[in-house]
Structures are given as C-alpha cells and as structure tokens.
Amino acid sequence: INNNSSSCAPSNFTILPTLPAGFLQTPGSFSETLNWGASVSRMFLVTSPTDAEPGSYPVAQSVDTGEFIATATATYTVVVPDTVPPTVSIDSPADGTTVSTKGKLSVSASASDASGIGEIDLLLDGALLASCFNTTSCSKNISLNSLSAGPHTLTASAIDNGVPTPNSAEVSITINVGGGSRKAGNANQLHGP
C-alpha cells in the first residue's frame, strides 16, 4: 500500500525475498509503481530443496522504495512424510481358536503409527465386517450360526494418516460342528503393502 499523501508523485516499489540456503522463489522479485493510496497483491511460490532437513525456516519479503524498506517474515515448515506402514494386530480371538456354531464371537484389533491411524477394517474370509475411522482400535461381535464348519480367516487391515500405506494381520479360527473340527495352520502374520 502506498501511504503517501495525494501531493506525492507515484512511488516505485521493489519486492525482494530473503530465503534460506537452497530455497527458490518464483518469480524472484517484483517491481511496482503505485499512486498514493493504491495497493497491489502478488502471488509467489517458494520451494525448498529436496534434501532440506525437517524443521522451520524463515522466509522474508522486503519492499524497497529506494528511501524506505519494510520487511515481512513468514515461516516455511518442512516435514518428512511418514512412509512406514502401521503396526496392526488382532487382539481377539487368538490364532487357531476353535469355536462352536452357536452364539457370537468378539473380534477386536488394534493398530498404531507415528502419523496416526486413519482406518481399521475387519474382514472375515475377505468380506468386510466393520470399518473404524480415526481410532487405534476396532471391534465387532459376529454371529457364528451361519458359518460353515472348518477353517475361516479373520483379517485386520489398517491405513495410517501419513502417505497412506496399508498393513494387515491375519488369524485362523475353526468352526466345530458336532465334535468334529479342522484347524487351519495359519500363524498370526503381518503383511506389508
């Protein structure tokens, strides 16, 4: 803003950046001529180097009229995206559990990640049982009455809040009918993306 009085001639302004080492600004500078009381806004892009360490960096813009200089400073924050998959486990039931076809089974899972958990899905033989959002635990009671005898696979899949990278854990359960049962030999295991 040109705050000169109406009796003054138009003023020339040059806007120049002061950047941390390796940072770039596009465009690099601006030159403006403003009448008294006039104002102007300009957009610019500041880019950090690809090898910049995480942290906060001061970015300054100075307006120079040749007689006066005014400076404004902002903070540019560099963060490193989280590309590590979340940790996920099925807390209940235990791998190799044998259950009857009567009643319900409680399924629970938990997950953790440095960037937080965005979603946990519980699946039975690949079919979705429940989805829980923005939480580190998820549970569901399932009816066993309609399940066939033999082995079944429970899966918990989690996605973090960083660069979304899924991870999952599995356990096997066996449905026992009339005293006869077959146990699946699947161990509790983690699967990467």
Image (cartoon, helix red, strand yellow):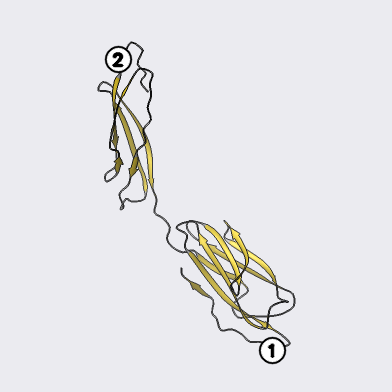
Provide residue 99's location: percent of width, then percent of height: 68, 80
Is 165 displayed left or right of 27 in the figure?
Answer: right
User: Residue furthest toward the left?
Assistant: 66
Pick the front one: 181 or 93? 181
Against 39, is 133 above or below?
below
Provide residue 33's location: percent of width, then percent of height: 30, 23
Quarter location, residue 104:
bottom right
Quarter location, residue 8:
top left
Provide residue 172's location: percent of width, then percent of height: 59, 78
Against 111, is 32 above or below?
above
Against 51, is 33 above or below?
above
Going by the numbered disc 1, the residue's amino acid type is: Gly
Is 163 displayed left or right of 132 in the figure?
Answer: left
Quarter location, residue 93:
bottom right
Secondary element at image label 1: loop
Secondary element at image label 2: loop
Residue at horizontal 71 percent and vertical 75 percent from the top: 144
Q: Quadrant of the N terminus?
A: top left
* Label placed on residue 9: 2
Against 183, is 73 above or below?
above
Q: What distance separates the C-alpha of mark 1 from that of mark 2?
A: 99 Å
Going by the numbered disc 2, the residue's amino acid type is: Ala
Mark 1 crowd level (few <14, some 14–19, many ≥20, 10 Å Cα):
few
User: Residue furthest toward the top?
Assistant: 7
Looking at the rendered image, the disc whose residue lies closer to the viewer, 1 or 2, is 2
Residue at horizontal 69 percent and vertical 78 percent from the top: 147
Q: Which residue is mark 1?
A: 180
Residue at horizontal 36 percent and vertical 33 percent from the top: 42
Provide residue 134's location: percent of width, then percent of height: 57, 56
How many numbered discs sit on the rendered protein? 2
Q: Earlier in the sequence, mark 1 or mark 2?
A: 2
Mark 2 crowd level (few <14, some 14–19, many ≥20, 10 Å Cα):
few
